[in-house]
Amino acid sequence: MSDLVLRNGLVAGRRLDVAIRDGRIHRVAANVDPTGSETVDVADKLVLPGFVESHIHPDKAFIADRTRGLEAGGPTAQTLVAELKKAFTVDDIYRRARRVLELAVRHGCTAMRAHVEVDGYVELRGVEALRRLQAEFNGVLDLKLIAFAQEGIFNDGVTRDLLREALKSGLEVLGGCPYMDRDQRRHIDWCFDIAVAFGVPLDFHADVADDPTLLTCDYIAEQTIARGLEGRVTLGHLCTLDVLEPDHRARVIDRLREARISVISLPATEMHVKARGDLRRTWRGVTRLGELRAAGVNVAISTNNIVNPFTPYGHPDLLRQALVAAIAGHLGNLDQLGWLLELVTTNAARAIGLQDYGLAEGCRADLVVLDARDPAQAITEQAEKLWVIKAGRVVARSSRTSQILTP
Ligand SMILES: [Zn+2]
């Protein structure tokens, strides 16, 4: 007997039932016997494993109303937020981050890996707020936390100790930001040393510039292999890949694959932030999603920023990010729309090391049911998320319908 049976779902193009027991999928088959189980008839709707936010910043969300935002020739988003976060309190961060998590769940997200800034401005206040939320969302959303060096590591005398303290307190990942230090390689080396010492994976914000001489992902790949950390390193952004000569780019992508580095593209932020002062053309800055995927690199997309100077219209809805990526990356053919949702589900799960993720029997019953028959329709119509299921329990249900009213 099952605890819950989703009846008549579309699973990889077939009409199947998904039977759930003890928080896990125990059968995926046609005509499962529902006797004694709670049932939900999902009536030919698309069933996917829950969306996974692999790169997101709840601690600096919902602060667009505290700043004028970006202007050509004005301060960068980093500078604007650095000023604002001096005044962040634990409660302020908690309230804004909580809204991010709630919106994410309502939009089908069942797992999230979030960056938490740790530096001389905000110290460990973000860590305290996000740790509280991590406990409170237990059973609704799996939340992993990254101790993130947004302000660089060598620009003050306290950040290194604060990052160590954050990892000691239980944060699961170390997050680097090499372009915020004058010597990028020194920053990268320090991160690798600390990650090895604490036995944690690494996640870098890397290569955001349009200047090929600033490229670091090749060095990060080299260090990943040298230190035997293949499969434990993730890179966000990688905008610079877009401006390399094709031969050079192909060699770098080969190295990323060899190092088993996952790449997380953040298209909404790139398109808002890049080329602000360029009078000739507006570089969009999105990494080469199709090329990376075709070369066998694990590629994901994520929301990154929510209602702040980096992305004032950011929203933790991964179906929206799939559409943004389609627009930004020339990914509109039916086969491309078909695999785009892998970038917010299975690939994102692999990037952050989720175990037992997917629609196979034995996987954790983390699911989203969309008001669509296939991924292309889901992306194009920005389909409603009808049911969100976490560990076998319905955690969000949308019944919003609209109809044309005839006279
Ligand atoms: Zn980010």
Image (spheres, rainbow, N blue to C red):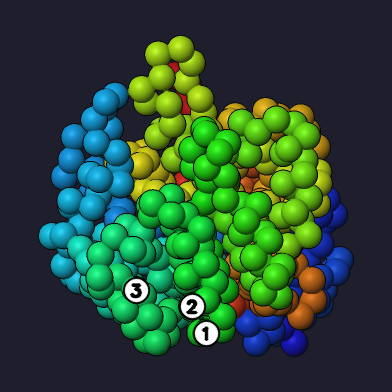
**Residue 170 position by quadrant:** bottom left
Q: Which residue is label 2 attached to?
A: 194
**Where is the N terminus found, in terms of image quarters?**
bottom right
Q: How many marks?
A: 3
Label 3 amino acid?
Arg
Q: Secondary structure at mark 3?
A: helix
Numbered tag placed on residue 160 in the rendering:
3
Q: Which residue is mark 1?
A: 197
Which circle's residue, 2 or 3, is located before the other in the chain?
Answer: 3
Tell me where residue 163 sits by quadrant: bottom left
Q: Earlier in the sequence, mark 1 or mark 3?
A: 3
Does any portion of residue 316 appear in the rendered image? no
Given residues 349 and 363, the one toward you in this image is 349
Q: Which residue appears farthest toward the left when viewing the image? A: 87
Circles 1, 3 touching at the beta carbon (< 8 Å): no
- Horizontal and vertical percent position of residue 331: 70, 32
Give me the residue at 33% from left, 63% from top. Answer: 154
Q: Residues within 10 Å of mark 1 (few under 14, many from 20)?
A: few
